[in-house]
Image (cartoon, rainbow, N blue to C red):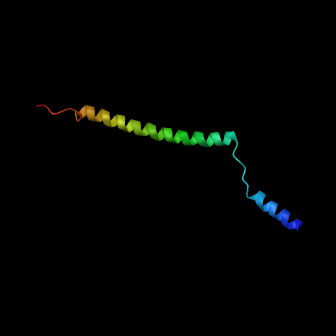
Amino acid sequence: MLRYAILGALIALSGCQREPTFDEAFKANEADLASKAAAIDAELDAAQSDAAMAEETGAGEAPAD
């Protein structure tokens, strides 16, 4: 009976995972946020270059009467 109790405890403990430390969680979040910031910056740069191109070609101007 004791063997089964020990075996059950070992199986239960083997299923537990260690929580990440603060530093590990911070690094993971930092990398995720850095990639999101880079994607946002690229999107803004593309929008600004499109707006500059439209301004140069006059595509944003209203037609003259």
Q: Residue furthest left?
A: 65
- Check the picture and name the quadrant holding the C terminus: top left
- Image quadrant in which you'd find residue 58: top left
Please indicate whether residue 60 sits to the left or right of residue 26 in the image.
left
What is the residue that sits farthest to the right in this orientation?
A: 2
Q: Where is residue 7 in the image (x, y as percent from the top left)?
A: 83, 64
Residue 12 occupies which quadrant of the picture?
bottom right
| Residue 46 percent coordinates (x, y) | 37, 38
- Depth check: 13 or 45 in front? 13
Residue farthest to the front, as pictured = 1
Residue at 46% x, 41% y: name it. Answer: 39
Please say if 31 is above or below 11.
above
Compared to residue 8, the image places residue 38 above or below, namely above
In which quadrant of the rendered view does residue 32 lie? top right
Left or right: 47, with 60 as reference point: right
Residue 51 in the image, given as x and y percentages of width and height: 31, 34
> In the rendered image, which quarter contains the N terminus?
bottom right
Left or right side of 42 for 58: left
For image coordinates 52% across by 42% down, the residue present is: 35
Q: Position of residue 37 (x, y in %)?
A: 49, 38
Instruction: Please name the residue shown 54% across and 40% down the image.
Output: 33
In this view, the residue in front, 6 or 26, is 6
- Number of marks present in the image shown: 0
